[in-house]
Image: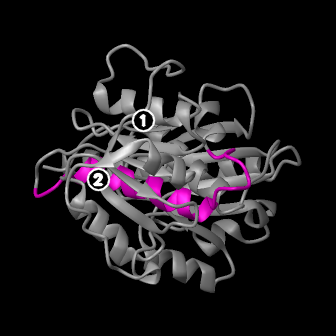
Amino acid sequence: MADSERTTRQEVTRFDREFLRSALALAAKPDIDHFLYISDTPISPDDLRRKQARKKLVYAVTAEPLAAELHGRKQKALVIPAYDYSRVERVKVALVSALAQGAFKEGDLVLCMTGRVGHPPDTLMQMRIGGSLDDRVAIEGIKLGDEYNSQVVDALIQLALQIGQEGYEGHPVGTIITIGDHNNVLEKSRQITINPFQGLGESERNVLDPRMREAIKNFSVLDGAFVIREDGVVLSAGRYLSAGDEDAKVPLGLGARHAAAANITAATQCLALVVSQTSGAVRLFKDGTILLELHQSARRT
């Protein structure tokens, strides 16, 4: 039995290698613009040697030190959350990050390789940026206009995913984060709790600072919404959004938090990120409709 089990493991390893080599061969074809490899185990130098796919390779990893190491090797790498997404959701998250950082552009054909966390990649997906695939919704969420800072939007999407997955001290929480058109948002909302960010200098409350993102996670237990300027400066937490609902389009089954986000984005030019307390799903609203929807396959307990 032991010999049989050992043989099976060796066969799986050989198959994994052959699968990767086949993926690299596909990635080398002229039609493919980028090879998005979503794994914390870098491809070995031997497998990449003399491969055309090396020039197209973009890693999506879950650890900052690993991304820095890959950058040191002159390879492209971006960081995504280390949570237990389904394979499709992992691809969506990686594509959103890559688009926000300018790694891909409209019309690019991307070959995506992914798998379960902690296992060798076992899935290939072909994605045309701006195409008509089911995952187009994830791509359209980044086409937000020049007034939005893509780094700010990407940081807040990743933060919303963390809030949805982790909750607060083991308990699920939900929240709303508005981005942009802050004067109109403040006019169409009112403070319902003490604003924990009042009195802080602007340099101390920008979401591009990891310490501020950690603070937002902690304050996500407060009732009401966060109001954030286009450049990432947090203006307030604990705002009650009171815009009308004449243009909002909220799918059946979504509650008051999603309706509030849809209403405020219909009444102003802001974006709104909603974290569902029930499921941990993250939805991005603009103009009263959902542009981006990301679901957790499991939540931390």
Q: Is residue 62 left or right of residue 190?
A: right
For mark 2, give the secondary structure: helix
Q: Residue at x 53, y 81 (%)?
A: 68
Q: Residue at x 31, y 57 (%)?
A: 237
- Which residue corresponds to mark 1? 261
Q: Nearer the viewer, residue 46 or 196?
A: 196
User: Looking at the rendering, which quadrant does residue 109 occupy?
Assistant: top right
Q: Main secondary structure of the magenta part?
A: helix
Q: Nearer the viewer, residue 58 or 170?
A: 170
Q: Position of residue 102 (x, y in %)?
A: 71, 61
Eyeballing the image, is 31 above or below 42? Answer: above
| 230 part of magenta stretch | no
- At label 1, the amino acid type is Ala
Q: Is residue 264 left or right of residue 148?
A: left
**The magenta segment:** 142-169
Furthest residue to the bottom? 72
Q: Residue at x 71, y 61 (%)?
A: 103
Please identify the quadrant where the N terminus is shown: top left
Q: Residue at x 53, y 82 (%)?
A: 69
For mark 1, give the secondary structure: helix
The colour scheme is one colour
Using the numbered discs, state the Cα–Cα distance from disc 2 to disc 1 in whole angstroms: 17 Å
Task: Using the image, tell me which numbered label, if any, was put on residue 118.
Answer: none
Eyeballing the image, is 282 above or below 42? Answer: above
| 152 part of magenta stretch | yes
Furthest residue to the front? 187
Which marked residue is nearer to the observer: mark 2 or mark 1?
Answer: 1
Q: Position of residue 281 (x, y in %)?
A: 35, 37
Furthest residue to the right? 30
- Which residue corresponds to mark 2? 163
